[in-house]
Image (cartoon, rainbow, N blue to C red):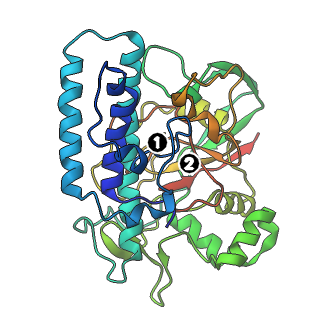
Amino acid sequence: MPDCSPVKWHRAHTTWFFETFVLAAEPDYAPFDPAFGYLFNSYYEAVGARHPRPLRGLLSRPSAEEIGHYRGEVDRRMERLLQGSLTAERAALIELGLNHEQQHQELILTDIKHAFWSNPLRPAYAPLRTGKGASDAPPPRWIDIPSGIYEVGHAGSGFAFDNEGPRHRVYLTACRVAGRSVTCGDYTAFIADGGYRRPEFWLSDGWARVQEEGWRAPFYWIEDPAGWTHFTLEGVRPIEPAEPAQHVSYYEASAFAAWAGKRLPTEFEWEVAMGRLGPPSAPSGRPHPDPSGEPIAQGQVWDWTASAYAPYPGFRPPIGAIGEYNGKFMSGQMVLKGSSWATPAGHSRLTYRNFFPPAARWQASGFRLAEDT
């Protein structure tokens, strides 16, 4: 699948990031292997040509062992660098690189899931762990947002990606946002009511995608006479109604919301509402969301929002190749907020702006509802 990459490519790419943007600035620096600049550049046009993304899975060489040596050598050079004094600019690049690596740690898990799904043997990545019960979650509690002006976006001394700022004010009309994401139990009711056969709920592009690709349920769901099952990193297992629904596209989230007589929250409504729920839950360590009926700000699945991915007022990407990190993708994508079971601990915050095309389904993407009041 063109959007997925082998584990060894992810490991090499994040190493290449440190080598290219941090170490290469050293006088007389010699690259570990000149060919790696072509093989492991992701999308930085200013850096040079690169291997096509859809063909990364065909890279039988270098081996995983060679990439391990590459990582070890770059790590040693980075450790030596960190023992000296750093300029503020270089320290910021290193911090960006560390957060970039955490992003790829998450992608490794979601890409492995797709690779194992594509294997007819459907191998399991981790042992099966039983859930907390098959009963559905209670109706969501709602978080009310009065009409008014609110500040959104990152502010403070902690790390944030450039697309999370500048902090600015927005006016929100009175609304309420669900305290939990839509569950598998909620979603099976949508399916049973003909949700995938009723065009009145769908955006035009979404309905076209349903017809072209034969969507009948979220990605990884398997129709069984005894009830829905789905493929997980713990293997094929029954749907637990109280689990957050995941692997749905923006189109599916929007259609469900229309069917339910609600809508998706904007990214600003989500940020304000979830800020009232407190800090995100800590990852459980399980490669799958846990059933939960309690309000939770983030930590189970990414939530699609109704917001197109666009720059905040006053946004300016950094000068140079590093400016391609986020800004160049601000077209044709939708914002997701929160984090998921695959997100590393400490790599989540209310202002985080994830983004994917509206048809993307292989990520751990879910959604929660909103309505005007």
For the C terminus, the quadrant is: top right
Callouts 2 and 1 close, C-beta under 8 Å: yes
Tag 1 residue: 298
Q: Three-letter amino acid code at disc 1? A: Gln
Residue pictured at 45% horizontal, 47% vertical: 294
Q: Nearer the viewer, residue 27 or 156?
A: 27
Q: Is residue 282 visible?
A: no
Callout 1: helix, strand or loop? loop
Tag 2 residue: 303
In the rendered image, residue 174, in percent from the top left (x then y), is placed at 75, 33
Q: Residue furthest front?
A: 28
Please state if 58 lies on the left or on the right of 162 as rendered: left
Mark 2 closeness class: few <14, some 14–19, many ≥20 residues within 10 Å: many
Q: Which mark is residue 339?
A: none
Please state if 129 lies on the left or on the right of 370 as rendered: left
In the rendered image, residue 69, in percent from the top left (x then y), is placed at 18, 46
Q: For residue 22, what is the image quadrant?
A: top left
